[in-house]
Image (cartoon, grey):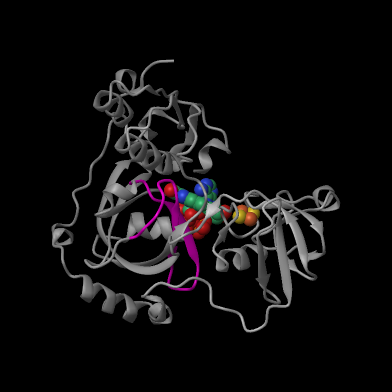
Amino acid sequence: MAQLGNVLRPSREAVEPNPAAQKLGRAQGDVAAANQQYPYHSGALRGTTLPASKSMPFQITIKPSEHSFACDDGETVLAAAMRADLMIPYGCRNGACGTCKGKILDGAVDYGAHQPGTLTAAEKAQGLALFCVAKPKTPLSIEVREVRRAGDIQIRKLPCRVEKIDKVAPDVAIVSLKLPANERLQYLAGQYIDLLLKDGRRRSFSLATPPEDDALLELHVRHVPGGLFSGQLFNEFKGREILRFEGPLGTFYLREESDKPIIFVAGGTGFAPIKAVIEHALHHEVERPMVLYWGVRSLRDLYLPDLPGSWQEQQQSWPISPISRAIRSTPAAARR
Ligand SMILES: Cc1cc2nc3c(=O)[nH]c(=O)nc-3n(C[C@H](O)[C@H](O)[C@H](O)COP(=O)(O)OP(=O)(O)OC[C@H]3O[C@@H](n4cnc5c(N)ncnc54)[C@H](O)[C@@H]3O)c2cc1C
Ligand code: FES
């Protein structure tokens, strides 16, 4: 294995941002424009958590913490936990990734719509459920790891403007989003946002910048052939488009109380949240050994080839080892 900056120098095609996109300070206009473009979201501008429910028929108790919260009829366990300011792990929130899997110790649930491979019949028989889609049918006692209290990190819906689009590899663009001038997104390095598309669909993208560097929110987007959003971005966006998003979401972030070594493994644009975490750790001079493996289909897909090396130069006493190997493509490695 060799240090990334020394061995890999793929070419990069940089696309100049639309000059008009560089004019800043039109936040109020952005908000109004976003409301016009997405009227069904306009009520959410001040930021909301999940709405309070009218009836609370099911009490849910988490073991071993004994934290207890109420869940409305038809509400998912995760949604109710978040409303109670408790954070259990989650990723996709649609039954696809398995991050929210936990055990039902007592009670019964409607398992909800999920990928069959993410929660198998055998796992259900063992009492497991995906709490992002499971809805209680009775009071529940559940066993699940609690990540942290959500505290004052509010999940919000906000407008933003596409400030620039840098095409840094044949199928990867770095998209910088500008929030209204009076807005900042509070988030933990590693979390993601959901872009809210016009027809009610969502697309998730990791925030590639740490919260300390939040003047622009950076996303790394891979062009999925035929993809609804990424297709639009690559073929139609010119900059200055107004989008709306919801976030921050997800439980991938640095557990700062730990001093254990970290091995990061990224495939393609899966590098984005890891970049945010490493830059956050650099900012706070975290002294934990860190190793990065960044798998790509070919060297030209290594879209920020010099960055890991620059991290090491910046903080030479910090024992990060930015190491990468170009891993041959497999369908799984190519997905992100
Ligand atoms: C938590 C989370 C974080 C994410 N972060 C990022 C990120 O930082 N950068 C990023 O580029 N993507 C990220 N994604 C994936 C992203 O949300 C979209 O799924 C992706 O951009 C495709 O959206 P689309 O609208 O262009 O394609 P769609 O219209 O949704 O899909 C078009 C076709 O491509 C297939 N497809 C969809 N996504 C992929 C894929 N990744 N690989 C291969 N085939 C696919 C679909 O099954 C469909 O057949 C993340 C997803 C999640 C759940
Ligand atoms: S399956 Fe992904 S969060 Fe529940």
Above or below, comparing residue 277 to residue 33 in the picture: above
Task: Please say whether residue 301 is one of the residues in the magenta stretch.
Answer: no
Q: Which of these two is toward me, 296 or 278?
A: 278
Identified at 61% across, 51% down, the residue is: 146
Name which quarter of the figure residue 114 lies in: bottom right
Name which quarter of the figure residue 139 lies in: bottom right
- Measured as percent of width and height from the top left, residue 38 is found at 38, 77
Q: Main secondary structure of the magenta part?
A: loop
Q: Which residues are magenta?
A: 185-209
- Marks counted in the figure total 0
Res 131 visible: yes
- Measured as percent of width and height from the top left, residue 220 is found at 37, 47
Residue 317 lies left or right of residue 63; in this view the side is left
Quadrant location of the N terminus?
Answer: top left
Q: Residue furthest bottom?
A: 54
Residue 249 lies left or right of residue 181; in this view the side is right
- Measured as percent of width and height from the top left, residue 257 is found at 48, 38
- Measured as percent of width and height from the top left, residue 156 is found at 42, 67
Above or below, comparing residue 172 to residue 65 in the picture: above
Name which quarter of the figure residue 238 lies in: bottom left
Q: Which of these two is toward me, 144 or 76?
A: 144
Identified at 34% across, 46% down, the residue is: 210
Q: Which of these two is toward me, 276 or 161?
A: 276
